[in-house]
Amino acid sequence: MTTYAVEVVYRGVFQKTLSRNICRGIVLAAHKEGKVGTAFGRYGDSPERNGVPAKYFAVVADDRIELEESLAKYEPKEVDVTICADDTLCRGLESWGWYGLQAINALTKENGTLIVTSKQTPESLLEDIHRTDTPYNLAILSGPASFSGLWVYKDDHTDVRILGALAKVLPGLVGLESYCQAIEEQWKSGAKVVSARRSYEQLHVRPVEPGEGSSAPRFSFEKPGWEEMKEALVVQGVAKGAGFRGGDGGFQAGRSEVFKKFSTRTMRPVINFEICTKCTLCWLQCPDTCFDVTPDGLYDVNTEACCGCGVCEDVCPVPDCITMVGEEHFKDNFSQYDWYQRDKEGYRQWLKGITAAQSAQKRSHGLHHWGQYQEELAAAGRGDNDDN
Amino acid sequence: MTTQQLRPIRGVHNAPLEEFYTSGHRTCQGCESALVLRLMVKAAGPRTIVLGSTGCMYVANTTYYSTPWVVPWMHTQLGSSGSAATGTAAGLKALMQKGKMRDEPINVISFCGDGGGVDMGLSAISASLTHPEYNHLVLLYDNESYANTDIQASGSSPWGANTTFSPPGRERRIMNTRWKKNTAIMLAHGHPKSRYFATGCPSYSLDLMNKVRKALTIGGPTFIHTFDPCPKGWDYDPKYSHELGMMAVEAGLWVQWEMEDGKLTYNGPSRMIATGRRKRRPVVEYLKRQGRFAHFTEEDIAYFQAQVDEMWEKWGTPGISSVKLDLTGDRA
């Protein structure tokens, strides 16, 4: 009598089809072994928003009564395996329906496993992942995060590679052969079966001791019930804002204290203040009101509010003035303007290095033109991207 | 009947720094509808009341105990943005007349999405436009689907677009075959006492802010329809939200215009196209950037282009209204 629960933590919309494929794959493979299961998205995450962290669950049990019993809990309170489909989620996630920042391994059981698709080392990921009181395992599936959109799916085999990895870390749930059968039936693709087997063999697992990991604070706050809310007000308005850092010049908008949005971000704008022409476009065209206007007319990104859409990079008329840089290069939400004011030379050097590092990487946030995914897969050799 | 006298903003450097719709909303990356609201209330200023009917811009902005609004706002039901606008404007007027409130002009803006405005709220908006004694603006932000509930087809979803209600179909082609877009001119035709109608696009932010200011200053009920690229439902990299808005205007698919006291003018690139100083970009450049059109065949693209060509070449008011005058024929 055992019930297994697996969660997939993913980027809303960009990885919606991917996470659904993974959870469906788990349940279909469980059927092969005479078990029953169900796959479902978390209610509080629907409707999904681009990039906003979301969750999908698969629950598998030996029989239907046992399954229904476990589902009475509405959504799993703890899981055997947490699958993190994008390593920038390791720093924590703020789902749009819930408040505060939750650790990526918040639901992972003692001696459970966290599978991350990443090109980073376990040590580098553990700088981001919050520490726990109990031991668990960190498994890394080498490869880039797979992003596509709502209508066109990028079939780079990430779904089946994760299923192969799951067979390795949780063989009690479903064995590799059942996964392979289910994959063959579901996708009618021998190549996908090969990808699943290969990831089973290549998976790297590292035990994590209690206390290992990041001690960064998880942002949280009081959530008042309806009786504690103020009379005639369901929601408090936001303060109007004032001059930059409370001074006389510039402007800094008041911002919501209870929803910060930065965990939605996979890339952040990096600004070369020295070539900025103060044209206002990044500030004016930002849907999230991220830019603070400094007294000298420059624009500083408020990285707690920025969700990394990249519109500022696109509207900026000066080449290389704003560059979107992958979030894996950063550890916190520091102010670039403050740094620039403090140490201009140091900032210049850092900027040079970070933009060079970024130019070697590719942005993967959904479709740019028809046929793009096929071109990318052909260039990578039909989905076998585990070596890059 | 006084209104706030909001002067046109001359140049982006003169745009007000103050924000009345700020960070803390739960929209997608690159959400242009959020930008519309931000620009709308930035132009309107602090003495403004905002009413929002159900849709992305209500749900994502005002979930439990959190909001990006700095000005007072209230939620209203999906079909009632028009009624809420009239009711609020009338209520303010009554309170001021009775001396229960300081007598001052307060902007009343009611917004609705294309589901709330193009589909179910159309009659209430029409009703609100028949009350010249009340000052308010109804702003329709159009992201071409019911985006909040995960992209169902709305009245203004474009021909052929993939939505959960109109999948392209595996065995047989299903697709959305309806074509409805020109809500602002539709409303302009039938409400002669309303003084201002316009279309806008957040890619042309200054133009949009000035249209909001004009609508609020002119008085009476007014209406603005905006075109907002939606990275989730249209399936593209959020980075290109701004660019896609510009492409739609340059392709002649979305027409920027305003009508003040019955006089219609084209704005920006649409003016250049209408006066023949600029050629329309081929529609395929716009289509091929979006996953929702990824199933299009050559014939589909040609059909889409032909529809846009017809708008500009055959219509009485090119790109805006198909009404043509013909005094020669008489069927009586």
Image (cartoon, coloured by chain):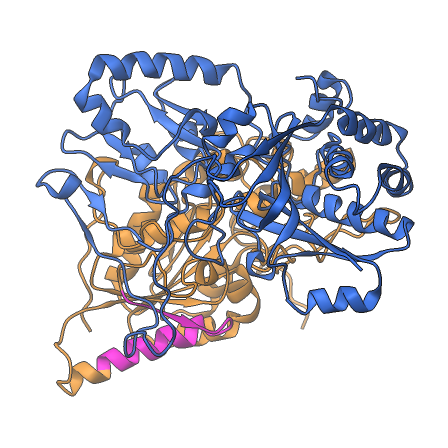
Chain colours: A blue, B orange
Residue B314 in view in this figure:
no
Q: Which residues, given as a range, are shown in magenta? A: B72-93
In the rendered image, the quadrant that contains the N terminus of chain B is bottom left
B265 to B250, vertically: above or below: below
> In the image, residue A339 lies at what x, y percent?
23, 24
Q: Nearer the viewer, residue B238 or A370?
A: B238
> Which residue is at 68% across, 70% downward?
A72
Q: Tag count in the figure? A: 0
> Which residue is at 83% across, 66% downward?
A64
- The single residue placed furthest to the left in the displayed view is A248
Q: Quadrant of residue A256?
A: bottom left
Is A230 left or right of A364, judged from the image as shown? left
Is B199 left or right of B291, judged from the image as shown? left
Residue B1 in view in this figure:
yes
Q: Is residue B56 a member of the stretch shown in magenta? A: no
> Which residue is at 53% across, 19% downward?
A361
Q: Nearer the viewer, residue A142 or B183?
A: A142
Is A143 left or right of A247, judged from the image as shown? right
> In the image, residue B96 lies at what x, y percent?
17, 81
> In the image, residue B75 lies at what x, y percent?
41, 70
A25 to A351, vertically: above or below: below
In the rendered image, the quadrant that contains the C terminus of chain B is bottom right
> In the image, residue B261 lies at what x, y percent?
33, 61
Q: Is residue B82 a member of the stretch shown in magenta? A: yes
- The single residue placed furthest to the bottom in the displayed view is B98
Q: Nearer the viewer, residue B135 or B238?
A: B238
Q: Nearer the viewer, residue A131 or A363?
A: A131
Is A82 left or right of A128, judged from the image as shown? right
